[in-house]
Image: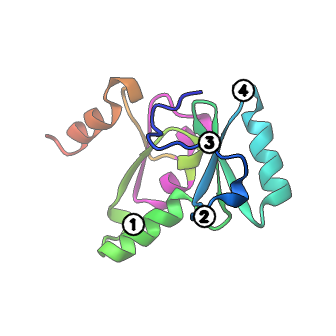
Amino acid sequence: MPLYHMKNLKIVPDLFQVDDTFFKFNIQLQHDDLTQAIEFLNKHYGNDVYAAVSGFGSIDIMRSNIDKGIALNRLSRLKGIPLTEIMAFGDNLNDLEMIQEVGLGVAMKNAKPEVLQASDLVTETDNNHDGVLNTLQTYFKL
């Protein structure tokens, strides 16, 4: 299991014993099971949670009224920046709403087909070859 990004991971015997606020859960499954799992979760529990594939065999499970698009919308209002002036990059299904919400949605070259279809622009290079940086340099003529 790729835990490289979890610095303060604690294993507990019972989630109900945890005295903290949960913002999302992340589960790891075999890559072949991801689509079926999110469809099941969203169909049976969609009033309470929203599940989206987030990469590396992971599924993010959040409250039903939370996704990156909603978060970016709120941030844009707080900062006074219209969504039409925001560029967002994504590669997986948990980026889809964000890509659709902004003025310029950019899919990474190696993005999921749904993200590629929803985007206004596709990077010339992928995540592992400075796709975001290269696109920003080209777009802003840096």
Residue stretch rendered in magenta on the structure: 97-118
Distance from disc 4 to disc 1, alpha carbons, whole Å, reads: 36 Å
Circle 3 residue: 11
Left or right: where 5 falls relative to 21? left
Distance from disc 2 to disc 1, alpha carbons, whole Å, reads: 36 Å
* Screen quadrant of the N terminus: top right
Distance from disc 2 to disc 3, alpha carbons, whole Å, reads: 14 Å
Name the colouring of the figure: rainbow
First-in-chain label (3 vs 1) = 3
Give the label on residue 30, or none: 4
* Screen quadrant of the C terminus: top left
First-in-chain label (2 vs 3) = 3
Asked which secondary structure carries label 3, the reply is loop
Distance from disc 3 to disc 1, alpha carbons, whole Å, reads: 39 Å
Kindly tell me whether residue 99 is visible in this rendering. yes
* Residue count near mark 4 (Cα–Cα under 10 Å), binned few <14, some 14–19, many ≥20: few
**Which residue type carries mark 4?**
Gln
Which one is in front in this view, the residue at disc 4 or the one at disc 1?
A: 4
Kindly tell me whether residue 126 is visible in this rendering. no
Circle 1 residue: 83
Which one is in front in this view, the residue at disc 2 or the one at disc 4?
A: 2
Which one is in front in this view, the residue at disc 3 or the one at disc 4?
A: 3
Residues at discs 2 and 3 in contact (Cβ within 8 Å): no
**Which residue type carries mark 2?**
Asp
Circle 2 residue: 19
| Residue that appears at 80% across and 38% down | 36
**Quadrant in the rendering for residue 81:** bottom left
Depth order, front residue of 63/20:
20
Verify whether residue 108 appears in magenta: yes
* Residue count near mark 1 (Cα–Cα under 10 Å), binned few <14, some 14–19, many ≥20: some
